[in-house]
């Protein structure tokens, strides 16, 4: 398969002795290339591109196009599909296949609607370059949204959406490479968490003990469950005799709706979380209170087998849980932290108690131990010193072991 390069300008056409059109020798106009290719139906089509500054640039583009079409990239997609069109179709395919958690689908749709389609949607997919993506990312970093600037970590999440969509385009052989995968991103550092100290946590648990959701916050603090996991916890997933629970579902808030789905990570599904005796006792007392509520509502009670529910048995809204937590923190006069910091606090306490990092990672349901290490390494200063002393104590030494050098 071959092609040709040629020049187009406003000068009258000139031909050589054989009647073939000659390229204009003047330094104006632009260079084009063209070549034939057969589409998947077997029909011959012509691929033509222009706007190159030199014949060398046009030849390089010709060779790239020949390589692309030789790899089976669909010509009709290459010629017509815009970035906006592909992103929208990709999102619909993912939704139809059920490969998105509801909250992920909502965030992905927002990334496409608010950022990528306005910035890149008008480009033809086949013409999108790394420079185009770099300029769009620079625009995100400069402008963000009307209400606030985007943090580097937010830009990375938004970028990940585009990279995933274009990976799909490469897999389908619509484009030869993923320009988003080669874009430059600002380096980010995982922020250091600063959960409550044990004294602060104890003060909060004492202050909230009389609240209807007090046991919910105790379970969060003493197990490290995520908010959606504790809201979705069912009595069928709790064994109070063995003092253990299993995380099998999670509730996320999508708009005003509470949607039941899988836990956040695959490693978080069906994970076993052991309970201490005090937390198990609190759950027993909570169950008795819930039985009284069920009896009071009678036939109007919604039975979902939930450990933590509204008075009528219906699902709690995750955002309501967070707002209730903040109100209780303010009433107790404690240092303000996020609800999610109760999860960090559980990790902090376990690491301070000398629990192995691998055990902590599994208990929290992290997708990998690296996340646990990156998040909590700064909490290990005292633990490391204790470990060094404990290891040294196991090594027998002679009486002269402490002589100075």
Image (cartoon, rainbow, N blue to C red):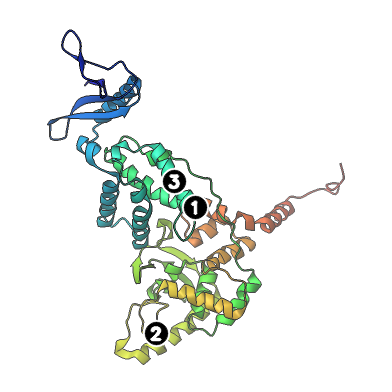
Does the image show residue 130? yes
Residue at screen point 22% across, 20% down: 12
- Toward the right, the furthest residue is 404
351 vs 16, left or right, is right
Q: Position of residue 109 (x, y in %)?
A: 33, 57
- Toward the bottom, the furthest residue is 296
Q: Position of residue 213 (x, y in %)?
A: 48, 80
Secondary structure state at the residue bearing disc 3: helix
- 333 above or below 98? below
Secondary structure state at the residue bearing disc 1: helix
Q: Which mark is residue 290?
A: none
Q: Earlier in the sequence, mark 1 or mark 2?
A: 1
- 373 above or below 278? above
160 vs 207, left or right, is left
Secondary structure state at the residue bearing disc 2: loop
Instruction: Give the distance between the C-alpha atoms of the residues marked 1 and 2, in whole angstroms.
Output: 39 Å
Q: Position of residue 104 (x, y in %)?
A: 37, 58
282 vs 267, left or right, is right
- Which quadrant would the N terminus be assigned to in this image? top left
Q: Which residue is mark 2?
A: 311
Q: Earlier in the sequence, mark 3 or mark 1?
A: 3
Neighbour tally class for label 3: few under 14, some 14-19, many 20 plus, Cα within 10 Å: many
Q: Nearer the viewer, residue 237 or 42?
A: 42
Q: Nearer the viewer, residue 124 or 357?
A: 124
Q: Which mark is residue 153?
A: 1
Q: Which residue is mark 3?
A: 137
Residue at screen point 69% across, 58% down: 382
Residue at screen point 44% across, 52% down: 157
Between circles 3 and 1, the one closer to the viewer is 3
Quadrant in which residue 230 is drawn:
bottom left
């Amino acid at each position: 398969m071959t092609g040709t390069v040629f020049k187009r300008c406003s000068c009258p056409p000139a031909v050589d002795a054989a009647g073939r059109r000659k390229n204009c020798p003047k330094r104006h106009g632009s260079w084009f290339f063209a070549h034939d290719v057969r589409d998947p139906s077997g029909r011959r089509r012509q691929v033509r591109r222009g706007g190159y500054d030199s014949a060398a640039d046009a030849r390089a583009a010709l060779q790239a196009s020949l390589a692309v079409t030789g790899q089976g990239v669909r010509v009709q997609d290459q010629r017509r599909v815009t970035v906006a069109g592909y992103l929208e179709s990709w999102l619909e395919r993912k939704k139809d296949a059920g490969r998105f958690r509801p909250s992920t689908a909502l965030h992905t749709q927002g990334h496409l609607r608010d950022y990528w389609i306005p910035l890149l949607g008008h480009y033809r997919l086949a013409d999108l370059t790394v420079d185009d993506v770099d300029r769009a990312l620079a625009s995100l970093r400069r402008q963000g949204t009307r209400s606030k600037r985007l943090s580097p970590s937010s830009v990375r999440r938004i970028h990940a959406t585009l990279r995933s969509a274009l990976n799909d385009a490469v897999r389908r052989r619509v484009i030869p490479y993923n320009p988003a995968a080669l874009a430059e991103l600002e380096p980010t550092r995982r922020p250091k968490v600063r959960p409550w100290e044990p004294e602060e946590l104890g003060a909060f648990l004492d202050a909230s003990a009389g609240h209807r959701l007090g046991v919910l916050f105790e379970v969060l603090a003493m197990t490290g469950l995520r908010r959606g996991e504790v809201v979705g916890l069912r009595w069928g997933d709790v064994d109070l005799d063995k003092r253990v629970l299993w995380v099998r579902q999670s509730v996320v808030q999508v708009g005003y709706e509470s949607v039941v789905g899988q836990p956040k990570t695959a490693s978080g599904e069906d994970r076993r979380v052991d309970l201490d005796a005090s937390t198990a006792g609190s759950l027993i007392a909570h169950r008795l209170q819930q039985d009284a509520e069920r009896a009071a509502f009678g036939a109007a009670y919604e039975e979902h087998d939930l450990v933590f529910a509204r008075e009528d048995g219906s699902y709690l809204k995750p955002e309501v849980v967070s707002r209730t937590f903040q109100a209780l923190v303010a009433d107790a006069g404690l240092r303000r932290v996020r609800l999610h910091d109760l999860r960090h606090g559980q990790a902090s306490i376990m690491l301070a108690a000398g629990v192995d990092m691998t055990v902590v990672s599994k208990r929290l349901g992290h997708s990998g131990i690296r996340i646990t290490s990156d998040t909590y390494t700064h909490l290990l200063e005292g633990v490391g010193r204790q470990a060094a002393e404990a290891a040294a104590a196991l090594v027998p030494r002679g009486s002269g072991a402490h002589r100075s050098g």
